[in-house]
Image (cartoon, grey):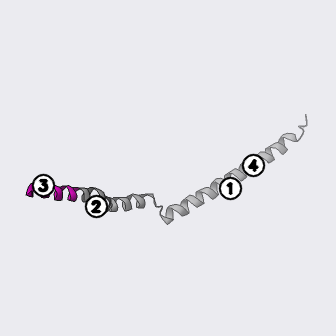
């Protein structure tokens, strides 16, 4: 009878560990790692400013390209005196 009770208690504890505490244990073990991973994906404010300046520079270059294209088109339409 004692063996049956011991086996029952052992089974109940194992079931409790598997079902109830598994998520909590995983959260505690990996909780720090999850925070570290999230921090890796955060962008520093200085990087954000640099990215914005770069985006603005690229936009200005695209606008300049269009202006230069229009000027070249005008130059090409001027008849050459031969």
Residue at the spot of label 4: 66
Residue numbers of the magenta segment = 1-14
- Do the residues bearing badges 2 and 4 touch, measured as CB atoms within 8 Å? no
Q: Which residue lies furthest to the left in this view?
A: 2
Q: Which residue is labeled 3 in the image?
A: 4
**Structural crowding at the residue carrying mark 2, measured as other residues with C-alpha within 10 Å and reported as few (<14), some (14–19) or many (≥20):** few
Disc 2 is placed on an element classified as: helix
Quote the CA–CA distance across marks 2 and 4: 64 Å
| Inter-mark Cα distance, 1 to 3 | 80 Å
Tags 1 and 4 touching, CB below 8 Å: no
Relative image position of residue 7 (x, y in whole percent): 14, 54
Q: How far apart are marks 4 and 3 (CA)?
A: 86 Å
Q: Is residue 71 rendered to the left or right of residue 60?
A: right
Disc 2 target residue:
21
The quadrant where residue 3 appears: bottom left
> x%, y% of residue 32?
33, 62
Quadrant into which the N terminus falls: bottom left
Residue drawn at point x = 88 percent, y = 41 percent: 78
């Amino acid at each position: 009878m004692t063996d049956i009770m011991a086996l029952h208690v052992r089974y109940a504890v194992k079931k409790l560990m598997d079902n109830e505490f598994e998520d909590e244990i995983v959260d505690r073990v990996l909780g720090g790692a999850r925070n570290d991973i999230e921090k890796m994906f955060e962008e520093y404010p200085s990087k954000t400013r640099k990215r914005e300046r770069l985006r603005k520079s690229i936009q200005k270059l695209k606008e300049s390209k269009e202006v230069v294209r229009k000027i070249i088109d005008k130059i090409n339409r001027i008849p050459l005196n031969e």
